[in-house]
């Protein structure tokens, strides 16, 4: 594989200006792709634009259907097509027992995590088919293969993403489009710290005790990095992953349970 296996290809990444999305963007750009990102954070978008002035970065909320459609129209017009879609946008959702959960938290989590991916795939589909080498990567979670007490909206959305992925792989495969899901495990960083703190609060324990509990459920006893996830994304987009489709691939150190 060459150092620029994605030369001449174009990609859209939702929530691509920070976190896992930014790591994936860095990897795809490093492999020669043209990349457009959208994100809800103006600061993150400004940072991406400063680092990559030849790319496209806009402030758009994935739940803003009209805004997303406008972004896709602008990007595909500028790039002259689309080869790769990375559905990365998502939220952690509420942490609570089902009887105590505000239904608005459920609605928001499903709307952003699942419906956001549907909207992006719907807008990208015809262009990915025209590519002849299209690829969709849907970011799910190990919660998409495991039960997750007190995090039912999040887990439900991630299980649904796996089903969405497998269905799209069957539907779009005859048109040469590969569709896979990446299931990150416990990804080190501020977002995971927030999740651990929220769960610690809900369980009446300390942050350190809850963190150790999480690590004790990982076979390798360590968290993964955003770059680990980006490396898998790059592999799946590249010729090396040319015959991989319909898969839900965990990057997690083997999380045994949540």
Image: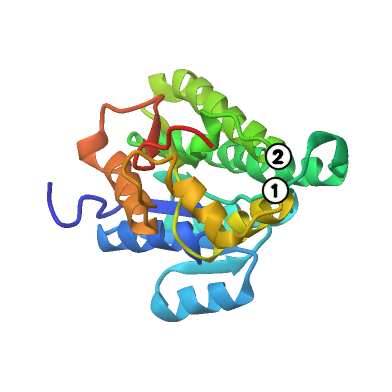
- Between 182 and 38, the one lying in front of the other is 182
In-image side of 114 versus 76 (left or right): right
Residue 182 location, x and y as percent? 43, 39
* Marker disc for residue 68: none
In-image side of 116 versus 240 (left or right): right
Residue 69 location, x and y as percent? 66, 50
In this rendering, the label closer to the viewer, 1 or 2: 1
Residue 62 location, x and y as percent? 66, 53
- Between 173 and 26, the one lying in front of the other is 26
Q: Which label's residue is closer to the chain start, 1 or 2?
A: 2
Task: Identify the residue position indicated by label 2 in the image.
Answer: 150
- Does residue 87 appear in the picture of this structure? no
In-image side of 157 versus 162 (left or right): right
Which residue corresponds to the image point at 56% horizontal and 52% vertical from the top-left?
210
- Between 100 and 202, the one lying in front of the other is 202
Q: Quadrant of residue 35?
A: bottom left
75 over 154 or under it: above or below: below
Dot 1: element: helix
Q: Quadrant of the C terminus?
A: top right
Which residue corresponds to the image point at 41% horizontal and 24% vertical from the top-left?
246
Residue 126 location, x and y as percent? 51, 35
Task: Identify the residue position indicated by label 1 in the image.
Answer: 203
Q: Quadrant of residue 175?
A: top left
194 over 93 or under it: above or below: below
Q: Residue furthest bottom?
A: 50
- Does residue 229 appear in the picture of this structure? yes
Q: Are marks 1 and 2 in contact (CB under 8 Å)?
A: yes
- Between 58 and 150, the one lying in front of the other is 150
Dot 2: element: loop
């Amino acid at each position: 594989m060459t150092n620029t296996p994605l030369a001449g290809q174009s990609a859209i990444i939702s929530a691509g200006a920070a976190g896992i999305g930014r790591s994936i963007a860095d990897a795809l750009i490093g492999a020669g792709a043209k990349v457009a990102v959208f994100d809800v954070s103006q600061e993150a978008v400004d940072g991406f634009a400063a680092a990559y002035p030849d790319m496209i970065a806009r402030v758009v909320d994935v739940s803003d259907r009209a805004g997303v459609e406008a972004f896709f129209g602008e990007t595909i017009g500028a790039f002259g097509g689309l080869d790769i879609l990375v559905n990365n946008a998502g939220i952690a959702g509420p942490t609570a027992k089902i009887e105590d959960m505000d239904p608005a938290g459920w609605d928001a989590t499903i709307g952003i995590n699942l419906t956001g991916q549907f909207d992006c795939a719907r807008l990208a589909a015809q262009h990915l088919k025209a590519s002849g080498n299209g690829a969709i990567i849907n970011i799910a979670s190990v919660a998409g293969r495991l039960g997750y007490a007190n995090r039912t909206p999040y887990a439900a959305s991630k299980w649904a993403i796996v089903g969405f992925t497998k269905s799209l792989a069957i539907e779009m495969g005859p048109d040469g489009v590969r569709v896979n899901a990446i299931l990150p495990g416990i990804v080190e960083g501020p977002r995971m710290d927030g999740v651990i703190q929220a769960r610690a609060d809900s369980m009446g324990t300390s942050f350190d005790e809850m963190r150790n509990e999480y690590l004790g459920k990982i076979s390798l006893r360590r968290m993964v990095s955003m770059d680990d996830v980006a490396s898998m994304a790059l592999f799946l987009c590249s010729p090396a992953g040319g015959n991989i489709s319909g898969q839900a691939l965990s990057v997690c150190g083997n999380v045994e349970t949540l």
